[in-house]
Image: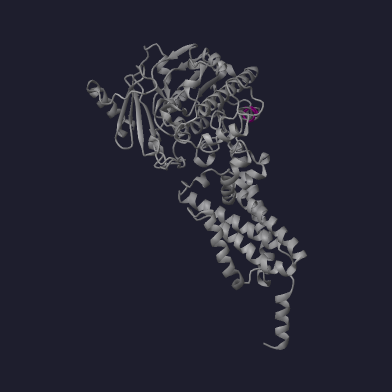
């Protein structure tokens, strides 16, 4: 090389860069778009069992790159300040810092790789690779300058495209031929509300006066049972009429979009369909429960979204949230309370005149940590006021077995009952509002719960722990003036699996119903119709991911697949190890005395075994 060439090369090498902000922004967009690409590939290959990708806001394709853009721009600004104060130090630090940051975030995409391992590997590889690649050198600057604007354009197109996609879907739904002479359907699910703690079912505390009032206008089911002791499979069964084992091959799987849903079927017949959910853990659109809905609000809608919600959708945000979430906020999931669900539903309803609606409302207020919204009235016992109380309730959902301190359990019970009372009051306000709008007379109302809760029974805490009654016995009310008798009580055990068939029957669309099961309306008929009601198949299943609890043991449902059946006045449970339990529910509602070894019950045990068979469930 000539002397002149060397001088030019040295000048190029030592020339100050235009800054670190543009390279940082470029890296953030690249890392974010790579993560989006990986998620889309996983969905394409049906590899969506990974919890992170199933709990994303439906706007994740633009939220993820936007969140990384914000993080890298913040780092770029810090490096810019360093460059202006200490240019020599910035020149040595910036390339390695940005390279390590990008590699660390990309390594997060490797399933099972711990955060600490990502950081160590990212820093190690960056320290070796960055000097050799000449990162932030002149060639890199050219690439950044040439591609940063196109990358920003991609982000803008993702935002616009996602909004256009959902707007077009709702526009198409609004132009469907409306159903004629069909009643509205209001499908209410009280997440994690067991029947035992409702005054509607004889509980000592007056927790549900408004539901009692509603029950006088319709049919109350005394022994309604969920199909599963946790949210996703229970909701999926209520929407499809199929048992969990028919819908899912493994724990935390996405619902197959080809399976007919209640929302989809009613939508095909001219209904406006809207879902409004507070349980964004398992009722979000990523798990497929939004299938068939014209409008579905799970996470906060776009223009109400906080920066924290955008950040949470990235892998980086989820890892940070997992570590710090419960420390930073008293309600770690940022859940919507019942009043907000009501407001969102009524706002949507005002935009749907002249068309019957099917509305699904999911309320999460009675789910752990049992902390009622600010301003809710305290009704029972202790109120969680001290930091220690709040900390205990926030940790409650992680427990599997009962606390050794009776006062802790008393606090949890009082808080749980207060949350149920708040839900009852809020539902009352909703019914009053619908009544003022003149809608209640022509609305089929279904009120139920997806599963119950253990509050120390069998020394268990929470749900998804077993197939005992407190996790499966849920409220069920069906009300429709002129179509459903008033003040009727059905004492026979029933399954929530029959709800889709029941709804389409009561709205007059059962001729070509795609839903298995039978209409529960048969149970309040006079018995003279063409179809004589026989006993329902009341079956529940649990197939939950195995994990080890803190004390080294596992509750029954975490040891492997289980099945239970309620029939002939008895509850039968088959555990994962093949062990069996049988209880007479009338004499032993708490299921404390196992009768499976009684010789006199062997014939009944054989019949219960046969009902628990997978072939019978089909």
Q: Locate residue 420: give its quadrant.
A: top right
* Magenta segment, prevailing SS (helix, strand or loop): helix
Nearer to me, 80 or 284? 80
Which residue is the extreme one toward the right?
84
520, 451: nearer the viewer: 451
Q: Is residue 343 magenta?
A: yes
Q: Residue 525 location in percent, x, y?
A: 41, 13
Please state if 571 lies on the left or on the right of 11 as rendered. left
| Region in magenta | 342-346
Q: Residue 365, how many percent across, how many down?
A: 57, 29
The way the protein has been coloured in the rendering is one colour
Residue placed farthest to the bottom in the image? 2
**From this viewpoint, which residue is outermost toward the front?**
405
Q: In this view, does 404 lie to the left or right of 387?
A: left
Placement of 376 over or under 253, stated as above or below? above
Asked whether the viewer can see residue 503, the reply is: yes
Query: Is 430 drawn above or below residue 247 in the view shown?
Result: above
Q: Where is residue 350 in the image (x, y as percent from the top left)?
A: 66, 27
Q: Residue at x 39, y 24 (%)?
A: 518
Image quadrant in which you'd find residue 612: top left
The quadrant in which the C terminus is found is: top left
Q: Is-magenta flag for residue 57?
A: no
Q: Can residue 475 be seen in this view?
A: no
Q: Is residue 565 left or right of residue 95?
A: left
């Amino acid at each position: 090389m000539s002397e002149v060439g060397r001088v030019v090369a040295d000048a190029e090498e030592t020339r100050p860069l235009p800054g670190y902000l543009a390279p940082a922004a470029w890296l953030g967009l690249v890392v974010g778009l790579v993560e989006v690409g990986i998620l889309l590939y996983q969905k394409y290959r049906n590899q969506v069992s990974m919890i992170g990708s199933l709990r994303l806001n439906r706007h994740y394709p633009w939220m993820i790159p936007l969140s990384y853009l914000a993080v890298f721009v913040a780092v770029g600004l810090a490096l810019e300040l360093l460059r202006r104060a200490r240019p020599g130090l910035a020149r040595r630090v910036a390339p390695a810092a940005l390279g390590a940051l990008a590699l660390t975030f990309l390594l997060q995409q490797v399933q099972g790789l711990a955060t600490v391992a990502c950081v160590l590997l990212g820093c190690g590889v960056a320290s070796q690779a960055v000097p050799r690649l000449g990162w932030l050198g002149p060639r890199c600057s050219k690439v950044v300058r040439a591609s940063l604007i196109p990358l920003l354009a991609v982000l803008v197109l993702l935002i616009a495209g996602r909004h256009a996609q959902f707007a077009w879907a709702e526009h198409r739904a609004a132009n469907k031929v409306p159903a004629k002479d069909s009643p509205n359907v209001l499908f209410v699910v009280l997440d994690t509300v067991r029947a035992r703690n409702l005054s509607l079912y004889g509980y000592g505390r007056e927790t549900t006066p408004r539901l009692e009032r509603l029950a006088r206008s319709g049919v109350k089911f005394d022994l309604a049972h969920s199909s599963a002791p946790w949210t996703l499979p229970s909701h999926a069964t209520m929407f499809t009429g199929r048992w969990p084992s028919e819908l899912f091959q493994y724990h935390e799987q996405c619902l197959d979009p080809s399976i007919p849903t209640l929302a989809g079927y009613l939508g095909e017949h001219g209904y406006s369909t809207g879902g409004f959910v507070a349980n964004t853990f398992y009722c979000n659109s990523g798990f497929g429960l939004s299938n068939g809905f014209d409008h579905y609000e799970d996470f906060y809608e776009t223009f109400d979204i906080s920066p924290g919600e955008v950040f949470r959708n990235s892998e980086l945000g989820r890892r940070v949230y997992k570590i710090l979430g419960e420390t930073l906020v008293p309600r770690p999931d940022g859940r919507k309370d019942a009043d907000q669900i009501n407001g969102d539903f009524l706002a949507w309803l005002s935009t749907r005149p002249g068309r019957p609606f099917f509305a699904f409302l999911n309320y999460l207020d009675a789910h752990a940590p049992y902390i009622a919204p600010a301003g809710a009235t305290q009704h029972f016992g202790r109120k969680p006021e001290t930091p220690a109380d709040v900390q205990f309730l926030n940790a409650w959902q992680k427990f599997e077995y009962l606390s050794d301190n009776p006062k802790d359990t008393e606090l949890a019970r009082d808080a749980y009952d207060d949350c149920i009372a708040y839900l009852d009051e809020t539902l009352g306000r909703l019914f009053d509002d619908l009544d003022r709008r003149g809608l209640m007379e022509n609305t089929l109302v279904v009120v139920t719960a997806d599963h119950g809760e253990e509050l120390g029974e069998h020394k268990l805490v929470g749900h998804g722990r077993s197939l005992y009654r407190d996790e499966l016995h849920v409220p069920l009310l069906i009300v429709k003036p002129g179509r459903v008798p008033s003040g009727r009580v059905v004492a026979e055990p029933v399954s929530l699996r029959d709800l889709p068939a029941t709804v389409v029957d009561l709205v007059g669309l059962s001729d070509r119903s795609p839903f298995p099961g039978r209409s529960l309306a048969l149970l309040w008929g006079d018995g003279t119709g063409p179809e004589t009601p026989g006993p329902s198949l009341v079956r529940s299943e649990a197939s939950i991911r195995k994990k080890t609890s803190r004390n080294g043991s596992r509750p029954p449902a975490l040891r492997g697949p289980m099945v239970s059946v309620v029939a002939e006045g008895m509850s039968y449970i088959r555990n994962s190890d093949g062990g069996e339990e049988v209880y007479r529910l009338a004499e032993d509602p708490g299921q404390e005395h196992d009768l499976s070894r009684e010789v006199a019950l062997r014939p009944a045990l054989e019949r219960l075994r046969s009902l628990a068979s997978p072939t019978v469930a089909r």
